[in-house]
Image (cartoon, rainbow, N blue to C red):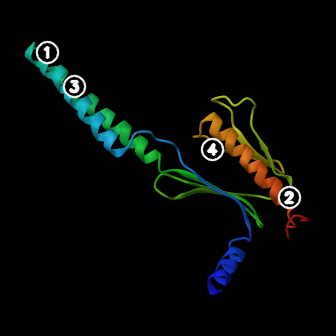
Amino acid sequence: MAGREDRDRASRESGGRVFFDAVLHPHRSLTRRGFAVVMAIAAAGLFAVGLLFLLLGAWPVIGFCGLEVLLLYIALRVSFRDARASERIRLSDSGLEISRLTPDGAVAGTWRFPPNWLRVTMEEPPRHDSKLILSSHGRNLVIGRFLTPDERAELAAALRAALDRWRCKPNPCAAA
């Protein structure tokens, strides 16, 4: 029974009941192993091209091939670093809170919205440039920019459903 009391106390301290809690991360399909394979194939291919040009007497080409491998490595490392960014969306009794983390783990911003008047809008049908916007009391916030259009539409539907549950349940701040 002590475990339940600890859970209830932690629930009250963190803002009460949680109606929605999601952490969004940018999708990267290339794994660490895939990164090593891509780099090995690119380095081998560009080395072969550079060696061919070196044998033909165009020795500067091998330097440019090395530069291409270096630029590919840097681009993929930056992509991996950017994949560590995240957004956390949490709807609880105390309200809606959105937190953004930078790739190095620092908080880029935290926004709080009272759910009573919160609107979740997105263009239908979802397109690549469609934005998922949270609006309340003249403030707007775009969330999930790195998601695909279908993922943004799914997030919008889930967030609307959670807001409906929040509004239908007896809430201490629903009358505020």
Alpha-carbon span between mark 2 and mark 3: 60 Å
Q: Residue furthest top?
A: 56
Along the polypeptide, which appears first: circle 2 or circle 1? 1
Badge nearest the viewer, 4 or 1:
4
The quarter of the image holding the C terminus is bottom right
Q: Quadrant of residue 6?
A: bottom right
Q: Position of residue 33 (x, y in %)?
A: 31, 43
Q: Residue furthest bottom?
A: 2
Please give the label number shown on residue 144: 4
- Res. 63 in view: no
Q: Secondary structure at mark 4?
A: loop
Alpha-carbon span between mark 3 and mark 1: 17 Å
Q: Nearer the viewer, residue 172 or 7?
A: 7
- Res. 122 in view: yes
Q: Residues within 10 Å of mark 2 (few under 14, many from 20)?
A: some
Q: Position of residue 35 (x, y in %)?
A: 33, 40
What amino acid does circle 3 point to?
A: Gly
Q: Which residue is disc 1 drawn over?
A: 58
Q: Are marks 2 and 1 in contact (CB under 8 Å)?
A: no
55 to the left or right of 148: left
Q: Residues within 10 Å of mark 4 (few under 14, many from 20)?
A: many
Q: Which residue is disc 3 drawn over?
A: 45
Alpha-carbon span between mark 3 and mark 4: 37 Å
Q: Nearer the viewer, residue 49 or 58?
A: 49
What amino acid does circle 4 point to?
A: Gly
Q: Secondary structure at mark 3?
A: helix
Give the residue at x 78% y 48%. 160
Q: Which residue is disc 2 drawn over?
A: 167
Q: Position of residue 61 (x, y in %)?
A: 19, 20
Total marks in image: 4
Alpha-carbon span between mark 2 and mark 1: 72 Å
